[in-house]
Image: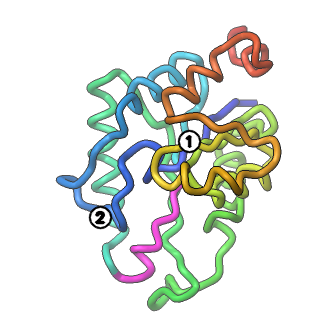
């Protein structure tokens, strides 16, 4: 089975901007491309799992999300990094039309992580969820993953409410560097170790 690191997008990989969908507004959090590359080099599947309720609310389209994800992938490639799979939830209970539903994929529910595990034979217990919100931690915990909160995005404001057992780091790069430390117990389960 495959070990994965699930990454929230907004506030974890890129600077938080409400309802981001425009390529010209996208900015990496410093160190994020390096962190993704380190995960690739360590043999982890890198899976982005992102709530995109702006689609359901009618602020932008699924095509806009796909365009932005292609842009992020192109920018990561410049640093020798890649995302292996992109999952997003376009739904919202107060959304419009077919997007107006209480689904199983919207974090804090673990639907996106469970679907990724099904498609890619991911060992959830040997995997990690990294994000900047409590809903990320709740989704990761519900899927059986190790959880890491980063202080970027909304993380510093939500740190006081973090779930027991969740680790907290300043940013994605710091979290990934900590994962690579042999003394933390995770390294021994890394592919190729």
Earlier-in-chain disc, 2 versus 1:
2
Q: Residue at x 50, y 35 (%)?
A: 171
Q: Indicate which disc residue 73 carries.
A: none
Q: Residue at x 65, y 57 (%)?
A: 134
Q: Residue 137 location in percent, x, y?
A: 69, 52
Decide: few, some or many residues near mark 2? Use Cα within 10 Å; few <14, some 14-19, many ≥20: some
Closer to us: 45 or 36: 36
Q: CA distance from mark 2 to mark 1?
A: 26 Å
Is residue 64 located in the magenta-colored stretch of the structure?
no
23 to 36, vertically: above or below: below
Q: Kindly state the secondary structure of the residue where label 1 is placed.
A: strand
Magenta extent = 49-58
Q: Quadrant of the C terminus?
A: top right
Q: Quadrant of the N terminus?
A: top right
Q: Nearer the viewer, mark 2 or mark 1?
A: 1
Is residue 50 located in the magenta-colored stretch of the structure?
yes
Closer to us: 82 or 186: 186
Q: Residue 119 location in percent, x, y?
A: 65, 47
Q: Residue at x 63, y 16 (%)?
A: 180
Q: Kindly state the secondary structure of the residue where label 2 is placed.
A: helix
- Residue 91 located left or right of residue 117: left
Q: Kindly identify which residue carries mark 1.
A: 150
Closer to us: 156 or 57: 156
118 to 187, vertically: above or below: below
Q: Residue 113 location in percent, x, y?
A: 67, 52
- The colour style of the image is rainbow
Decide: few, some or many residues near mark 1? Use Cα within 10 Å; few <14, some 14-19, many ≥20: many
Rendered image quadrant of residue 31: top left
Q: Kindly identify which residue carries mark 2.
A: 64
Q: Residue at x 27, y 37 (%)?
A: 74
């Amino acid at each position: 089975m495959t070990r994965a690191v699930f990454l929230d997008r907004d506030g974890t990989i890129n600077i938080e901007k409400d309802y981001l969908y425009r390529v010209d507004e996208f900015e990496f959090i410093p160190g994020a491309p390096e962190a993704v590359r380190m995960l690739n080099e360590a043999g982890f599947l890198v899976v982005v799992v992102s709530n995109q309720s702006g689609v359901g609310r009618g602020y932008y389209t699924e095509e806009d999300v796909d365009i932005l994800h292609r842009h992020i992938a192109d920018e990561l490639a410049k640093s020798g990094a890649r995302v292996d799979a992109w999952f997003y939830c376009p739904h919202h209970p107060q959304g419009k039309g077919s997007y107006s539903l209480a689904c199983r994929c919207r974090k804090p529910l673990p639907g996106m992580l469970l679907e990724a595990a099904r498609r890619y034979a991911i060992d959830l217990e040997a995997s990690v969820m990294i994000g900047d919100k409590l809903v990320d931690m709740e989704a990761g915990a519900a899927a059986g993953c190790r959880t890491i909160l980063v202080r970027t995005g909304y993380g510093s404001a939500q740190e006081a409410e973090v779930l027991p057992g969740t680790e907290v780091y300043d940013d994605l790069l710091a979290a990934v560097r900590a994962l690579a430390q042999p003394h933390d117990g995770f390294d021994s389960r890394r592919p190729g170790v």
